[in-house]
Amino acid sequence: MPILRFAPVLMVVALVLGVIAPVRAAAVHHDLDVTLDPAAGTLEVSDRLRLPPGAREFRLAPELAVREASVAGRSLPVRRDGDRLRLTVPDGADDVLIRYGGTLPAFAARTDRAAGAEGAFLPGLSGWLPSTGLEPPSWRLSVRVPAPFLAVATGRLVEETRGADFYRAVFEETRSVEEPSLFAGAWTVAERMHGTLRLRVYGHPEHAPVAEEYLDLTARSIDGYAARIGPYPFDGLSIVSVPPPVGLGFPGLTALGRAVLPLPFVRSQSLTHEILHNWWGNGVRVGEGGNWSEGLTNYLADHAAAQARDPAAGRAMRLDWLRDYAALPPERDSRLTEFRVKSHDASQIVGYGKVALLFHMLRDEIGSEAFDGGLRGFWAGHAFQDAGWSDLRKAFEGAAKRDLEGFFAQWLDRRGAPSLTLVGARMEGDSVALTLRQEADPPYALSVPVEVETANGVERHRVRLDGRETTATLRVAARPLAVAVDPGMDLFRRLDPGETATILRDVTLHPGTAMVLAAPEGEARAAAQTLAARLLDGKAGKGVEGPGVPLLLVGTDEGVASALAARGLPPVPASLTGRGSARVWTIRSPERAPVLAVSGADAAALQALLRPLPHYGRQSWLVFDGGKATDRGVWPVGDSPLRRFVESP
């Protein structure tokens, strides 16, 4: 099951170049005394707040009732409207006591804050403590839970006590970092000191076999990123098993769903992503003008790990990003400066994939030494502060000692992408004359990778394409046989149809997709309807069937087979026939429109796809047994139109 990532904009403080970076004092301070009973779902809090002038309005979850609000023992008038709380505080009073509590929602009801027999899940900014919405607070948090539960929070662990029937711990953050996040569970703790850093895994019994591996990977990742960027910004890292199937990064803490924590890909990819967020997003905070941190983290963690395993894996990841973008209809595209958080597939394609490729192109443009110098300069100059794209640009300009305004502007401020055409390639003496054209108005300034296959091997070149068309002469050391333009998928561009296969997202992202429910009335049709709505993300399914219109067919095996035959479309591919409880595949209609077929044995088979299937948008076909994808893949493609044999003179 893929991890569902959603992370609030987080804030941190770190050591930079051996000294504490200057940090503005927190405007608000919480001194919290928390009594939490996860099984009963109850939370009782005493919060002594130090407030700046004018801070009188708060957000507090509506299920939490205010028991008392006072200043120096005098009661304060309280006005409540849903999750909005307003106190009437006398002028000059800055020390307010608020006692509040109530019963938290159950896990089945929501995932932003919840409690139950499985534990408690109270991330910062979810309303579990009074939030002013001002500069992030400093805080001290004392929490008590009944046995067998333990509790963990963001911040530095100051003390902990284990009694026969209770657990108590104190955490604190003296800097303006972020609201505290609090979790509880019936965990066993695996701990390791890594130098001065306290590393912990708060796991359940089934996690014991992987706990040491998590601690090893955490230590290696922290050391690697610190060497490249700057010192790790916290006192340690806690990896916490939580009930929701999430992967969340907080300052000095990573929350992973109990069911996904043991999965190999979580250790190989997801954990390092969340660790790196301690620098990008948690450390340097995302300011105005677009979220750069998800794409930068995606590139430096996920892509770097794939590239380290095998350069072919790095290329495959870049191809995935470009294939995603090829499936994105122009009307759902957006500027990078408009991306804030992932809210649907379209925003992920832009905010994660396109941003990651921007940094990949930047590294190629200025070189790896200047790129890493820009990262270090950005961290040193902006740790624990808000920063935007312009700050990033200036850091890389300083490291590269050149103006990068044009490079950033063409990727940040424009929707769309260039399309490349290899017009021709011919021999001219000991050189190859290569003609390239781009479709974009105005043209992009591109440094295009070109490989020349020669009798003695492959030679790599770069061709500047600053206008609509250029002819470059490439000197080669041996007889040229063929040329390939951007074979490594190193440029952000719109793929030629001949470079990519049909994938699920070609149908699910299109706002004009037509929907056909191929199931009899009753449970099966209801399941098909729910699954279709889930796949289409509420953005499609209202199209009218016709030539060139993308089509989604969802239903039972018999119904889907009949619907395909009635439209003159081929049946289920032989490679999928008879396999699993459900089969999913893409084809193209005679008019070249993408078609997605989802065929289940019965209503239960379709219902089992509700959670997993939307996460496989990059695939061309899948086989499911219940909710588990047992096989999947992308249809093969033919020769790339950006590769040609060299013409003789």
Image (cartoon, helix red, strand yellow):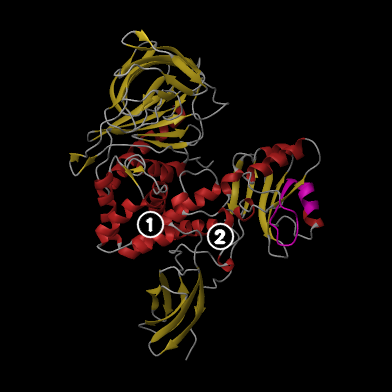
Q: Residues within 10 Å of mark 1 (few under 14, many from 20)?
A: some
Q: Is mark 1 on a helix, strand or loop?
A: helix
Residue 262 belongs to magenta span: no
Amino acid at dot 1: Phe
Where residue 344 sits: x, y (%)? 55, 45
Q: To which residue does mark 1 refer?
A: 359
Q: How far apart are marks 2 and 1 (CA)?
A: 19 Å
Q: What stretch is highlighted in magenta?
A: 543-563
In-front residue for pair 354/459: 354
Amino acid at dot 2: Ala
Decide which of tag 2 and tag 1 comes sooner along the chain: 2
Image: 433 above or below 349: below
Residue located farthest toward the top when viewing the structure as drawn: 73
Location of the N terminus by quadrant is top right
Residue 583, numbered label:
none
Q: To which residue does mark 2 refer?
A: 326
Which residue is at a point 43% across and 29% down the rendered structure image?
123
Residue 550 belongs to magenta span: yes
Instruction: Look at the image and tell me whether residue 147 can be seen.
Output: no
Where residue 586 sits: x, y (%)? 66, 56
